[in-house]
Protein backbone atom coordinates (compact mmCIF):
# COMPACT_ATOMS: atom_id res chain seq x y z
CA UNK A 1 0.00 0.00 0.00
CA UNK A 2 1.48 3.42 -0.94
CA UNK A 3 2.69 5.59 1.92
CA UNK A 4 0.10 8.25 1.07
CA UNK A 5 -2.80 5.91 1.77
CA UNK A 6 -3.15 7.21 5.32
CA UNK A 7 -4.85 10.32 3.92
CA UNK A 8 -7.67 8.34 2.36
CA UNK A 9 -8.04 5.60 4.96
CA UNK A 10 -9.66 7.26 7.93
CA UNK A 11 -12.63 4.94 8.19
CA UNK A 12 -14.76 6.71 5.62
CA UNK A 13 -15.26 6.67 1.88
CA UNK A 14 -13.12 9.05 -0.16
CA UNK A 15 -15.24 11.87 -1.56
CA UNK A 16 -14.74 13.73 -4.81
CA UNK A 17 -13.78 16.77 -2.69
CA UNK A 18 -10.99 14.77 -0.98
CA UNK A 19 -9.69 13.59 -4.34
CA UNK A 20 -9.95 17.08 -5.85
CA UNK A 21 -7.99 18.64 -3.01
CA UNK A 22 -5.20 16.07 -3.29
CA UNK A 23 -4.98 16.37 -7.09
CA UNK A 24 -4.91 20.19 -6.98
CA UNK A 25 -2.04 20.10 -4.48
CA UNK A 26 -0.09 17.61 -6.58
CA UNK A 27 -0.75 19.57 -9.79
CA UNK A 28 0.55 22.78 -8.21
CA UNK A 29 3.74 21.01 -7.13
CA UNK A 30 4.34 20.00 -10.75
CA UNK A 31 3.62 23.47 -12.14
CA UNK A 32 0.16 22.98 -13.66
CA UNK A 33 -2.33 25.85 -14.03
CA UNK A 34 -5.57 24.57 -12.54
CA UNK A 35 -9.24 25.44 -12.93
CA UNK A 36 -12.14 24.00 -10.97
CA UNK A 37 -15.56 25.62 -10.82
CA UNK A 38 -17.21 25.15 -7.45
CA UNK A 39 -20.93 24.65 -7.11
CA UNK A 40 -22.87 26.78 -4.65
CA UNK A 41 -25.90 25.91 -2.55
CA UNK A 42 -29.08 27.58 -3.78
CA UNK A 43 -32.71 27.27 -2.76
CA UNK A 44 -32.94 24.52 -5.41
CA UNK A 45 -29.88 22.54 -4.23
CA UNK A 46 -26.29 22.65 -5.47
CA UNK A 47 -25.73 24.54 -8.72
CA UNK A 48 -22.68 25.61 -10.69
CA UNK A 49 -23.09 28.98 -12.40
CA UNK A 50 -22.45 28.53 -16.10
CA UNK A 51 -23.81 29.13 -19.56
CA UNK A 52 -23.69 26.51 -22.28
CA UNK A 53 -23.77 22.75 -22.28
CA UNK A 54 -23.86 20.98 -18.92
CA UNK A 55 -21.39 18.27 -17.98
CA UNK A 56 -18.11 20.24 -18.12
CA UNK A 57 -15.29 18.23 -16.43
CA UNK A 58 -14.43 18.87 -12.79
CA UNK A 59 -10.86 19.87 -13.47
CA UNK A 60 -8.91 21.53 -16.28
CA UNK A 61 -5.11 21.52 -16.06
CA UNK A 62 -2.64 23.25 -18.40
CA UNK A 63 1.15 23.00 -18.47
CA UNK A 64 3.20 23.88 -21.53
CA UNK A 65 1.55 22.33 -24.57
CA UNK A 66 -0.50 19.87 -22.52
CA UNK A 67 -4.14 20.29 -21.57
CA UNK A 68 -5.76 17.75 -19.25
CA UNK A 69 -9.49 17.55 -18.52
CA UNK A 70 -10.46 15.26 -15.66
CA UNK A 71 -13.81 14.16 -14.34
CA UNK A 72 -13.48 13.11 -10.70
CA UNK A 73 -15.63 10.38 -9.23
CA UNK A 74 -15.88 8.63 -5.90
CA UNK A 75 -15.59 4.85 -5.89
CA UNK A 76 -19.30 4.53 -6.63
CA UNK A 77 -19.81 7.63 -8.77
CA UNK A 78 -20.89 7.29 -12.37
CA UNK A 79 -20.16 9.49 -15.38
CA UNK A 80 -23.31 11.08 -16.79
CA UNK A 81 -24.00 11.15 -20.51
CA UNK A 82 -23.42 14.94 -20.55
CA UNK A 83 -20.01 14.47 -18.91
CA UNK A 84 -19.11 11.68 -21.35
CA UNK A 85 -20.10 13.94 -24.26
CA UNK A 86 -17.79 16.73 -23.03
CA UNK A 87 -14.89 14.33 -22.49
CA UNK A 88 -15.40 12.90 -25.98
CA UNK A 89 -15.53 16.37 -27.57
CA UNK A 90 -12.42 17.52 -25.72
CA UNK A 91 -10.55 14.33 -26.66
CA UNK A 92 -11.48 14.88 -30.31
CA UNK A 93 -9.93 18.36 -29.98
CA UNK A 94 -6.61 16.95 -28.76
CA UNK A 95 -7.14 17.31 -25.01
CA UNK A 96 -6.03 14.50 -22.71
CA UNK A 97 -9.11 13.30 -20.84
CA UNK A 98 -9.44 11.17 -17.74
CA UNK A 99 -12.01 9.89 -15.29
CA UNK A 100 -10.11 9.67 -12.01
CA UNK A 101 -11.23 7.79 -8.91
CA UNK A 102 -9.49 7.23 -5.54
CA UNK A 103 -8.04 3.96 -6.92
CA UNK A 104 -6.21 6.00 -9.56
CA UNK A 105 -4.46 7.90 -6.77
CA UNK A 106 -3.45 4.70 -4.99
CA UNK A 107 -2.20 2.93 -8.14
CA UNK A 108 -0.29 6.12 -9.11
CA UNK A 109 -2.04 6.72 -12.45
CA UNK A 110 -2.70 10.34 -11.45
CA UNK A 111 0.91 10.88 -10.41
CA UNK A 112 2.09 9.38 -13.69
CA UNK A 113 -0.23 11.59 -15.73
CA UNK A 114 0.85 14.78 -13.96
CA UNK A 115 4.58 14.01 -14.05
CA UNK A 116 4.67 12.84 -17.66
CA UNK A 117 5.90 15.37 -20.21
CA UNK A 118 4.43 13.67 -23.28
CA UNK A 119 0.75 13.72 -24.19
CA UNK A 120 0.57 10.01 -24.94
CA UNK A 121 -0.67 7.78 -22.11
CA UNK A 122 2.22 6.03 -20.38
CA UNK A 123 2.25 2.35 -19.50
CA UNK A 124 3.04 2.01 -15.76
CA UNK A 125 5.77 -0.54 -16.57
CA UNK A 126 7.56 2.11 -18.68
CA UNK A 127 7.60 4.78 -15.98
CA UNK A 128 11.06 5.28 -14.42
CA UNK A 129 11.32 3.76 -10.94
CA UNK A 130 12.09 7.11 -9.28
CA UNK A 131 8.72 8.42 -10.50
CA UNK A 132 6.95 5.57 -8.77
CA UNK A 133 8.88 6.26 -5.58
CA UNK A 134 7.67 9.84 -5.37
CA UNK A 135 5.57 9.27 -2.26
CA UNK A 136 7.35 12.19 -0.59
CA UNK A 137 5.93 14.57 -3.23
CA UNK A 138 2.45 13.05 -2.97
CA UNK A 139 2.65 13.10 0.84
CA UNK A 140 3.47 16.84 0.72
CA UNK A 141 0.53 17.39 -1.63
CA UNK A 142 -1.79 15.53 0.71
CA UNK A 143 -0.54 17.41 3.76
CA UNK A 144 -1.10 20.71 1.95
CA UNK A 145 -4.61 19.58 1.00
CA UNK A 146 -5.37 18.64 4.60
CA UNK A 147 -4.12 22.00 5.87
CA UNK A 148 -6.28 23.84 3.32
CA UNK A 149 -9.38 21.86 4.36
CA UNK A 150 -8.70 22.62 8.02
CA UNK A 151 -8.15 26.30 7.21
CA UNK A 152 -11.35 26.40 5.15
CA UNK A 153 -13.28 24.81 8.01
CA UNK A 154 -11.91 27.37 10.49
CA UNK A 155 -12.76 30.24 8.15
CA UNK A 156 -16.29 28.87 7.71
CA UNK A 157 -16.72 28.46 11.49
CA UNK A 158 -15.61 32.06 12.08
CA UNK A 159 -17.92 33.42 9.39
CA UNK A 160 -20.97 31.67 10.86
CA UNK A 161 -20.54 33.12 14.34
Image (cartoon, helix red, strand yellow):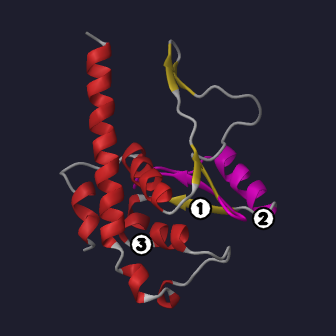
Indicate whether 52 appears above or below 18. Answer: above
Q: Locate residue 117: give its quadrant.
A: bottom right
Q: Residue at x 32, y 55 (%)?
A: 142
Q: Mark 3 and mark 1 in contact? Answer it, CB < 8 Å.
A: no
Foreground tag (3 vs 1): 3
Q: Nearer the viewer, mark 2 or mark 1?
A: 2
**Residue at the spot of label 1:** 98
Height in image: 62 above or below 53? Answer: below
Task: State yes or no: residue 77 in magenta.
Answer: yes
Quote the CA–CA distance across marks 2 and 1.
Answer: 13 Å
Report the residue marked by disc 3. Answer: 108
The answer to whether the residue labelled 2 contacts the one labelled 3, judged by CB atoms less than 8 Å apart, is no
- Residue highlighted by disc 2: 94
Dot 2 surroundings within 10 Å: few (below 14), some, or many (20 or more)? Answer: few
| Quadrant holding the C terminus | top left
Q: Position of residue 21 (x, y in %)?
A: 41, 47
- Asked which secondary structure carries label 2, the reply is loop
* Up-down relation of residue 12 to residue 112 (above or below): above
The single residue placed furthest to the left in the displayed view is: 11
Magenta-drawn segment: 63-92
Amino acid sequence: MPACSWFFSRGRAVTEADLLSAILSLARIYGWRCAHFRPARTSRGWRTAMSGDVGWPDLLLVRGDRIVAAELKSDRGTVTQDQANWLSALRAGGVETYVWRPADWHNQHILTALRTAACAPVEPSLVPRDWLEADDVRRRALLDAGRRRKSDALTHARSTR
